[in-house]
Structure formats: C-alpha cells, structure tokens
Amino acid sequence: MAVADFTTTYKESIFLPSQLSSLSSCLSNTRSHVLKPYLRARNVNKVYCSVAPNEVQTPVVPQPTSIKGECYGVFCLTYDLKAAEETKSWKSLINIAVSGAAGMISNHLLFKLASGEVFGQDQPIALKLLGSERSFQALEGVAMELEDSLYPLLREVSIGIDPYDVFRDVEWAILIGAKPRGPGMERADLLDINGQIFAEQGKALNAVASSNVKVIVVGNPCNTNALICLKNAPNIPAKNFHALTRLDENRAKCQLALKAGVFYDKVSNMTIWGNHSTTQVPDFLNARISGFPAKDVIKDTKWLENDFTEIVQKRGGVLIKKWGRSSAASTAVSIVDAIRSLVTPTPEGDWFSTGVYTNGNPYGIAEDIVFSMPCRSDGDGDYELVKDVLMDDFLRERIKKSEAELLAEKRCVGHLTGEGDAYCDLPEDTMLPGEV
C-alpha cells in the first residue's frame, strides 16, 4: 500500500521557499529523509497533509499521477542513500533484472535477492522485473509481496514488459523466462521459439544495460540460449554470459555424498561438463570427498560410470514424476549459488561449474559455443577457467558427445546468431533434465 492511501481527506498548500521553515510541525511527523528527496527530485514546494480541525496530522507524500511502470507502490518513494540514514557500511546500489519474474522460480529467487542472501547484508539493490502482457497482473502481485516483506536492502522495484525499459543500466541480468517444451514439440522447434526471445533480450542488453553486465541464462535450452544472447550483444564481453548448470552440480554433489555416507559439504571440485541436457557429464574423476579423490573413497567404478551419471542426468524427470511439477525452489537456490560463486572468492583448491563461452579454453573443446566447465573466481564477478584438471579417455569421450550436441544446436540457430540460415542436424533428440 502506498503512503498516500492512508488518508481520505487532503488539503493542498503551496509555499514559497521563504515559508518552508514554518513547516516544522508537519515535517516533524514524517520521515523527512523520504519527503525531502521527493521534493528535490521534482523541484516543487508542495506538501500534502491530512488535516483535522485545529491540528496538523501526519503529512502524506503524494503519489505521481502516472507511474508509467518506472517503479511500483512504496518503491516510488525514492530513498536517497546519501541522506542521513546511510550507514558507512552500505555499498552503492546495484540494479538487477529478472525475466520471467512472475514464474515459480522467481517466486523463490526474488526474496533471496531482496534479503541480502546473495550480494550481502550491506548491499542495497534495485529489482527490475520483466514479464509479459499475460503475466503483468501477476507481476504486480509479486511487487506487492516484495513491498509487504519490508526488506531494508530492497530500495527500488520496477516492473515492465519491454526489455529495453527493464534492462536499463542493470549490472546483473537473470534470464529465467522461456517457453517450456510442449507435447510433440521437437527440440529444434524449442530452440527456435526460445532463441527468438533471447535474441531480443540480447539486443536490449546491448543497447541499454551496463557495459559490463553479468548475465545468467536459466531459460532452456540454456547453453544455446546464452550463445544466442551473447551473439546479439556484441558490446558486452562474451565472457560475461553464463548458462546455469549449478543445479546439476548440486545434484551431483548430493549423490556422491549419499554414496560415500558423508554430508554434502565434504564434496568439492565437482564439475559438470557440457550441455544442460541428458548429454551432460558429471565429472567424478576430478571430484574430491573430504579432500581425497572421489574414486579413492567410492571404489564402485561401475556405479560411478553408469548409475551416478544417469541419476544426475535424469534427476529432474524423476522429481516431476514424484511431485507433478518441475523443480523451482532448488533451481532458485542454484541461481543463488551461481551468483555467489562469482561475487565471493573461490576457496583455495576448489572450483565451481558454469556454462561459459569456450573461446580460449585449455581443454580442446570446440570454440564459439557455451559449454559448462570448471571455473574459479576472485569474487569480483569475473572468473577464470581451471587449468589443472585430470582427463582420461572415458571423460573425453563423454565430453565429445555433449560438444557434438551443442555444435548441432548452434547450426540450428544460425539465423539467430548472424551466421546464416539454420540447418538442423541434431545427432538425436536428447532431452533437457526434467523433460518427460
């Protein structure tokens, strides 16, 4: 509920600058750090107060007559972080865009972002939420819930359906919105439909976002969608685009921990190689359990080479059969983990998985695709590929299969990446994790 909604009767008074000092009785009853920036921003000397006989009650800041999607509700009352309430520990506001913001994944993610769980308890944020015409009413509901949650770090919320408006000046873009694969839909059709969405969003990011924006692509098929997005954003470093494979990494860690009989925090150096599909490669060769190679702790080679890989690849599908819907909460958690891995220094000797642009990779993987690989970060939002990894014939063979699939997907979307006509020769119609 906006502040203006609390009163039913207003008296409008217009004051000359010389008369503003006489307003102390009105201003003493309001949060002057909210009201004063509002007046400065609009260069007006107009104050609205609720007036009862013979007394001045709590003043009310008027709502603009037209919000135009720039902000939502109470977040239209701009908070000036340079004002008296600023603490020395606060950082500069960062702008975060989320597409598909009315969906189930976002319903879990947005509140984690607003709480400070992702960027820290001293980091104020602005959320810019992108939806569609059909979801706009639900988007308003999301914004209302964010209002009612009273997160002190959440300083602004804006909602809209035009990426050129929503993505303006954002430093992080989390692209979740995508069409799910329907019954009878070929993988090539899904690549084309969702590819068009990410081509348009890439163009919008290129035009209006921060030049160093970090982009996390969640909407599937996320590897090729990330490639499409970066190809349509030539002014943004290709290295800044990520396809989310962190949920696959988390699932792999869980399975190794269960098999070894340890808690999952004992599992490290877990890599997911390749595509976010059933060709993905959970790497047990380089994984460690309690600091020891996983193969030395789990001596069941047959389980590692067969059951482990299949369980991780098909975990999403099993979850759908059990629950009747795809994973949302765990996906949101994995997005949080993926971002925190980029804004927090990687522990010494460890690494994390993310789908990134392959140009210059040290593993011999084909260039010009987005491929999940092991990375480390200094905590500045950037990353470097890990060079000291083991490779054997078993791992190479599986990596090549995922590489071939991504190269075929790339040919399928040539019309969206500026590389000519599409030519689809997918080696097989592999499924996304979670598809039935």
Image: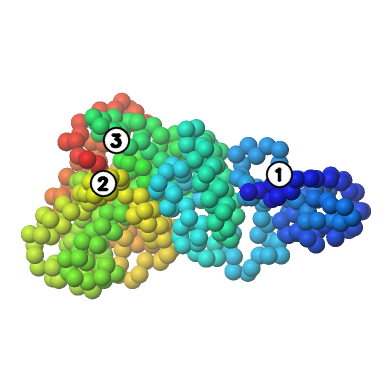
Say left or right for 195 vs 77: left
Q: Type of residue at label 1?
A: Gln
The percent position of residue 46, horizontal first and vertical second, equals 82, 47
Name the residue that disc number 2 marks.
320
Name the residue that disc number 3 marks.
181
Return the disc, 3 or 1, that comes first in the chain's sequence. 1
Say left or right for 337 vs 275: right
Give the Cα separation between the discs numbered 3 and 2: 14 Å
Cβ–Cβ below 8 Å for labels 2 and 1?
no
Give the Cα separation between the discs numbered 2 and 1: 45 Å
Q: Mark yes or no: residue 375 visible.
A: yes
Identify the residue shown where x is 80% and y is 45%. Answer: 10
Name the residue that disc number 1 marks.
63
The percent position of residue 192, horizontal first and vertical second, equals 32, 31
Report the residue that reaches farthest toward the front: 53
Return the disc, 3 or 2, that comes first in the chain's sequence. 3
SS state under label 3? loop
Residue 80 to residue 196: above or below? below
Q: Tell me the mark number nearer the camera, choosing from 3 and 1.
A: 1
Of residues 383 and 152, the one nearer the viewer is 152
